[in-house]
Image: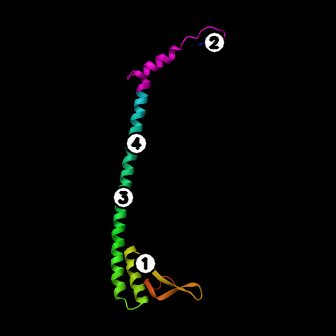
């Protein structure tokens, strides 16, 4: 390389020293890089552990939800086969759903095609009857 004056530039010796210092393990620069690498590795390990725990919780939750859904389906199928009419069926199903989901209250609403509205069924209510009042 040539400078503006036309003379040849000498290579920078400081760069060589820094490179040589990085190669030595006992240099302050090498120790700093080593400690930051160890810190990064520890962070990655913690994140990987947290991700694994989250996946295990999600899997366990999915299994419980699947078992609860199957249990509810079996109960509702039994109720449907023995119910004498729709309001009785709706009330029994609603009781099971509220119990399984730990809801304090539930209502069944039927569509009124003529008026194009939903109508709350007074006979198909689960939980405390005075929980809420309909107009």
Which of marks 4 and 3 precedes in the sequence? 4
Which of marks 1 and 4 precedes in the sequence? 4
Q: Which residue is mark 1?
A: 104
User: In the figure, is residue 135 to the left or right of 32?
Assistant: right
Residue drawn at x 35%, y 59% as measured from the top left: 59
Instruction: Indicate which label's residue lies in the foreground, 1 or 2.
Output: 2
Picture coordinates of residue 89, whole percent (x, y): 40, 86
User: What sort of colour scheme is used for the picture?
Assistant: rainbow
Secondary element under disc 1, as helix, strand or loop, is loop
Q: Which residue is mark 4?
A: 44
Question: On the image, which quarter does residue 71 sit in?
Answer: bottom left
> Considering only vertical position in the picture, is 80 above or below 102?
below
Q: Which residue is mark 3?
A: 57
Picture coordinates of residue 121, whole percent (x, y): 49, 87
- Highlighted range, magenta: 3-30
> Crowdedness of circle 2 by 10 Å Cα count: few (<14), some, many (20+)?
few
Which of marks 4 and 2 precedes in the sequence? 2
Which of marks 3 and 1 precedes in the sequence? 3
């Amino acid at each position: 390389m040539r400078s503006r004056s036309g003379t040849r530039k000498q290579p920078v010796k400081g760069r060589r020293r820094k490179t040589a210092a990085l190669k030595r393990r006992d240099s302050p620069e090498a120790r700093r890089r080593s400690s930051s690498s160890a810190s990064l590795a520890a962070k990655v390990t913690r994140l990987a552990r947290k991700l694994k725990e989250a996946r295990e919780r999600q899997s366990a939750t999915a299994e419980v939800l699947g078992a609860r859904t199957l249990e509810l389906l079996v109960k509702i199928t039994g109720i449907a086969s023995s119910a004498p009419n729709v309001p009785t069926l709706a009330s029994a199903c609603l009781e099971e759903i509220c119990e399984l989901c730990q809801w304090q209250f539930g209502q069944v609403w039927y569509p009124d095609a003529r008026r194009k509205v939903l109508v709350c069924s007074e006979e198909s209510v689960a939980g405390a009857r005075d929980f809420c009042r309909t107009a």
